[in-house]
Amino acid sequence: MTAPVVTRFAPSPTGFLHIGGARTALFNWLYARKHGGKMLLRIEDTDRARSTTAAIEAILDGLKWLGIAWDDEVVYQFSRAARHRDIAEQLLAEGKAYRCYATQEELTGMREKARAEGRAKLYDGRWRDRDPSEAPPDVKPTIRLKAPLTGETVIEDQVQGRVAWQNENLDDLVLLRGDGTPTYMLAVVVDDHDMGVTHIIRGDDHLINAARQKQIYDTLGWALPVMAHIPLIHGPDGSKLSKRHGALGVDAYRAMGYLPAALRNYLVRLGWSHGDQEIFSTQEMIDAFDLSAIGRSAARFDFAKLENLNGHYIRNCDDRVLVTLFEETLDYVPQGADIKPKLNDVTRDQLLRAMPGLKERAKTLIELIDSARFIFADRPLTLDPKAVVLLTPETRTLIGRLRATLESVTSWSAETTEAAMRHFAEQNNLKLGAIAQPLRIALTGRTTSPGIFDVLAVLGRETCLARLGDQSSP
């Protein structure tokens, strides 16, 4: 019977949950869910100087917002330091590791010599077989792994294929520093083993780490997890992803008005494909996801594609859900300070009724909020520059006449107001568009909006007549 699949996401809490990390977490989560297994979360907080509580919170919040749920309690690597030290001491006692008394000056000299000679191996192994009695009295030793000197270290990677390193080019890596703190390499191996991790899915910038970690696994006689090193995300121009390309925290995408489901869908298609399918429900992702369909070349981040996908999700989102998302987003955007105090039962109902028209045009929740501002606007409306240009004396006179006509509409709805305006247009030999734009300016302060008769219905008779009165000449 095969062991259940256990994956892990193991970020360092030195900053936000960036977009590459979010994709790695998603791939681990999908693989575990597909195989009925678990995805564990480990915070690799051994760098005490750079690890922060705020960063940990940002990572946890980012995963929750994306809908990526981990199993079991969060593991904090630093809390396991004693276990890591025990393993280093065990290897030392078994003769599989040794104390190295090289000084910082000696190590610097070794590195410089190796680089000058074009050698990848930087440490020359000088303490590998020396007697500790020769040790200088003032040096706190590190503990190094006795790595194999000949042969090769091989990883059969699920994405990269067979990857081999010549052992003569690999250093005896440090397991325990001079101050007794475990190194990242040792901590990761011990934690993955103790947590029962069966599959390690991570960025291919960790590929060289895989060689060093396999040597620790082999030395300890532990089974190596299945490895899958996924290509990094690049910008649209093929260069390393930077902030201008989209190398931002997940919290930034939330603040830009992206839906978590849309971002998940976009991320899953960065480097993984399933035929020509672009749109996936969460269950479809889980059912289809497989490591063999991950490409070896770097994926390219494309904001335009993400926006279009987000627009699709907004258009297909339930209106009540969108109202909730609208409200939640107000906490993350500057416009929220103006709109949030005006949210009440009346404006929420207006927003819900306006949603079918609003969501057709919006690609982000920010655009949705922006186009819904007319619901929450104070009188008299602040007109945008294009609207100001069009609000001529003649237009003001027309608005006054339209107001007088609408005043006679008693049963107020999109249908009744449209009928009144069409009748006015016919009586005055005008096209409907010549009436719609002045109405739009007076009611929303803008030259674009949802359908004008929907706007009339959403705002209601009293508000519409008042706003028309503000911009009209008798």
Image: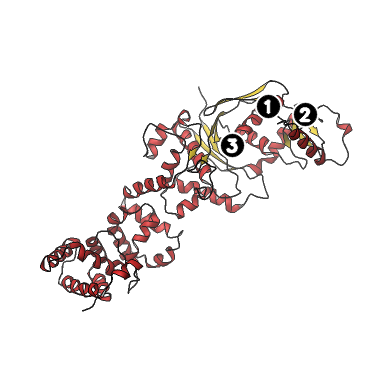
Nearer the N terminus, badge 3 or badge 2?
Answer: 2
Residue at 49% across, 53% down = 252
Q: Which of marks 3 and 2 is in front?
A: 3
* Residue 116, position as x, y percentages in the image: 75, 34
Spatial CA distance of label 3 from label 2 is: 33 Å
Direction from residue 321 to residue 164 in the image, left or right: right
* Residue 450, position as x, y percentages in the image: 28, 59
Nearer the N terminus, badge 2 or badge 1?
Answer: 2
Task: Name the residue type under label 2.
Answer: Ala
**Residue at which label 3 appears:** 205
Point out the image quarter for the C terminus: bottom left
Direction from residue 269 to residue 84 in the image, left or right: right
* Residue 379, position as x, y percentages in the image: 32, 74
Task: Name the residue type under label 3.
Answer: Asp
* Numbered label attached to residue 93: 2
* Numbered label attached to residue 220: 1
Q: Quadrant of residue 155?
A: top right
Direction from residue 125 to residue 234 in the image, left or right: left
Mark 1 closeness class: few <14, some 14–19, many ≥20 residues within 10 Å: some
Mark 3 closeness class: few <14, some 14–19, many ≥20 residues within 10 Å: few
Is label 3 in a helix, a strand or a loop? helix
| Between 305 and 283, the one nearer to me in the picture | 305
Spatial CA distance of label 1 from label 3 is: 25 Å
* Numbered label attached to residue 111: none
Nearer the N terminus, badge 1 or badge 3?
Answer: 3
Q: Does the image show residue 384? A: no
